Amino acid sequence: MSSVAKAFAEHRREQIIRPRPQSVPNPSSPLLPWLAVRHGEQPPIMLQLRFRVGSFRSFAYSDLREIYFRDAGHVELGVFGMSPKIITLAGRNLRELAEYLGSGLVYWIEESDPRTLDVPEASPWIDEIRIEELRSS
């Protein structure tokens, strides 16, 4: 009977269903201008763009139709929701961001603060986020 009690103790519900892990900033990793999904987290439904002035704008991932990666400092997103838009991310070292966006794994992207000192040249950086509406002629 003790082996049966031990088996039940090993397979309790609390151990099988665990809460989602909370994102914990890692001080040893460089500060990125985006937050991607970590192991075990649910993929986001919307992508949030955070601007230097403190405002933000969100877009549904279901409206993201195209990702154009020109070079390491230029990514364009084609969003076709209520009105078609082109979102341009200009900066440096954005290849990893383009790959995460293609998989729908980015919670938010923010413009980097130009007053930030001591940012290594190899670190990702977003100078500007532009949103342009496409107008039909």
Image: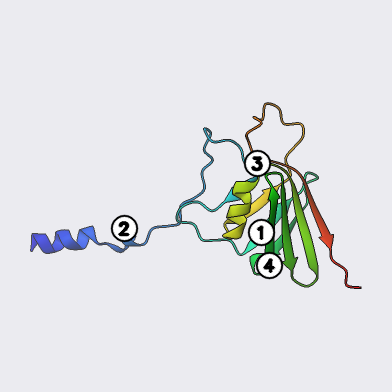
Q: Name the residue at 52% across, 32% down.
A: 28
Where residue 5 appears, x then y in whole percent?
15, 62
Residue 107: quarter of image: bottom right
Front: mark 1 or 4? 4
The amino acid type of the residue labelled 2 equals Gln
Dot label at residue 47: 1
**Residue 133 left/right relative to 112:** right
Residue under label 3, please give it: 93
Neighbor class of circle 3 (other Cα within 10 Å; few <14, some 14-19, many 20+) is some
- Sooner in the amino-acid sequence: mark 2 or mark 1: 2
- Residue most extreme to the front: 70
Q: Residues within 10 Å of mark 1 (few under 14, many from 20)?
A: many
The Cα–Cα distance between marks 3 and 1, rounded to whole angstroms, is 20 Å
Image check: 116 left or right of 3? right
- Can you identify the residue that label 4 sits on? 65
State the residue at coordinates (17%, 61%).
Answer: 7
Percent x, y for residue 94?
Answer: 65, 45
Name the N-terminal-most of marks 4 and 2.
2
Query: As drawn, which residue projects farthest toward the left?
Result: 1
Image quadrant in which you'd find residue 12: bottom left
Q: CA distance from mark 4 to mark 2?
A: 40 Å
SS at mark 1?
A: strand
CB contact under 8 Å: marks 4 and 2: no
Report x, y in % for residue 68.
70, 57
Closest to the observer, 35 or 63: 63
What is the distance, in whole Å, between disc 2 and disc 3 at their CAs? Answer: 41 Å
The quadrant of the image that shows the C terminus is bottom right
Q: CA distance from mark 2 to mark 1?
A: 32 Å
Q: Nearer the viewer, residue 11 or 136?
A: 136
Q: What amino acid type should be assigned to the residue bearing mark 3?
A: Asn
